[in-house]
Image (cartoon, helix red, strand yellow):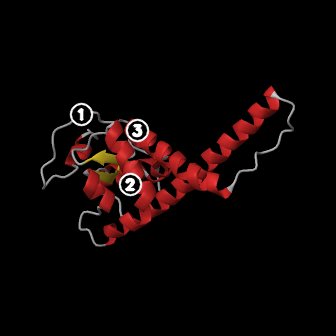
Amino acid sequence: MSAADRRARAISVRGHRAGFLTRLVSGGIDLVVTALILFGVLVAFAIGRYLVGSAPLTLPRVHGLFTAAAYPVVEVLYLATAWATTGRTVGDQLFGLRVVRRSGTRLGKIQSLLRAVFCAMFGFVSMLWILVSSKNNAVHDIVFRTAVVYDWSDAVRTSGRPATPESDVSAVEATSA
C-alpha cells in the first residue's frame, strides 16, 4: 500500500468513531505506558537518592499498597494531561485516535481530569457499552459528552461550532480541508 493510499484511507475515516477493539488495544497500551512512567519515577528517585547520599544505586523497595495507590494517580495524571493538551495518549497516537468533545473540539482541563478519574475507576467496564451503542459510545463518553474518533492529523481544534445530533463529531471532519 502506497503512502498516498494510506493518506486517502486516513482522510476517509477521519471523524468516524472508533470501535471497541481499537479502543481496547489503545487502552492496554496506555496501561503499559502508565506502568513505565511509574517505573521511571522509581528510577529517578533511586538516582536522586544515590547522588545526594551515600546509598547504593538500587530501586526502592515499595510496598504493594504504595503501588496500588500510586498507579491510579499516575494513570489519571497521564490521561488527563494527554487529553487536555493533544487529545491523544500514546495508545491513541498509535491507532490514529483522538478524544474530543461532541463538537469536535479539544477537551478542557476539568473535563479531561474528570473523564480520566472515571476511566481509571471504571475503564474496561465502561467500555463494554460500546458493544451495544450505535454511536460506539462508552459510558464515560456519554457521561462527559465526549467521543473517540479517528484523526491522524497533528492539528488540535480549540474551537468550533456546536454539533447537531445528526452531525455529531462532524466538526472534526471539517478540519481536514
What mark, if any, has residue 65 been given in the picture? Answer: none
Between the residue at mark 2 and the residue at mark 3, the CA separation in whole angstroms equals 19 Å
Asked if residue 16 can be seen in this view, the reply is no
* Residue pointed to by mark 1: 159
Amino acid found under the numbered disc labelled 1:
Ser
Residue at 37% over, 69% down = 128
Horizontal arrangement in the rendering, residue 117 relative to residue 78 (left or right): left
Q: Residues within 10 Å of mark 3 (few under 14, many from 20)?
A: some
Which of the 4 image quadrants contains residue 175?
A: top left
User: Callout 1: few (<14), some (14-19), or many (20+) C-alpha neighbours within 10 Å?
Assistant: few
Q: Which residue is mark 2?
A: 118
Could you tell which of marks 2 and 3 lies nearer the N-terminus? 3
Q: Secondary structure at mark 3?
A: loop
Numbered disc 2: secondary structure: helix
Q: Identify the residue at the far top of this view.
A: 52
Place of residue 20 in the rendered image (x, y in percent of width and height, measured from the top left): 38, 66
Q: Determine whether label 2 and label 3 are within 8 Å by CB.
A: no
Residue 142 visible in the shown view? yes
How many numbered marks have been drawn onto this rendered protein structure? 3
Mark 2: few, some, or many residues within 10 Å (few <14, many ≥20)? some
- Give me the residue at 50% from left, 44% from top: 78
- Who comes first in sequence, dot 1 or dot 3? 3
Numbered circle sitting on residue 86 = 3
Q: Earlier in the sequence, mark 2 or mark 1?
A: 2
**Mark 1 and mark 3: Cα distance apart in space:** 14 Å
For image coordinates 40% across by 38% down, the residue present is 86
Are the residues tagged 1 and 3 within 8 Å (C-beta)?
no
Residue 31 point in image, percent of width and height = 54, 55
56 lies above or below 33: above
What kind of residue is marked 3?
A: Thr
Question: Where residue 141 sits in the image (x, y, percent)?
Answer: 30, 56
* Quarter of the image that includes the C terminus: top left
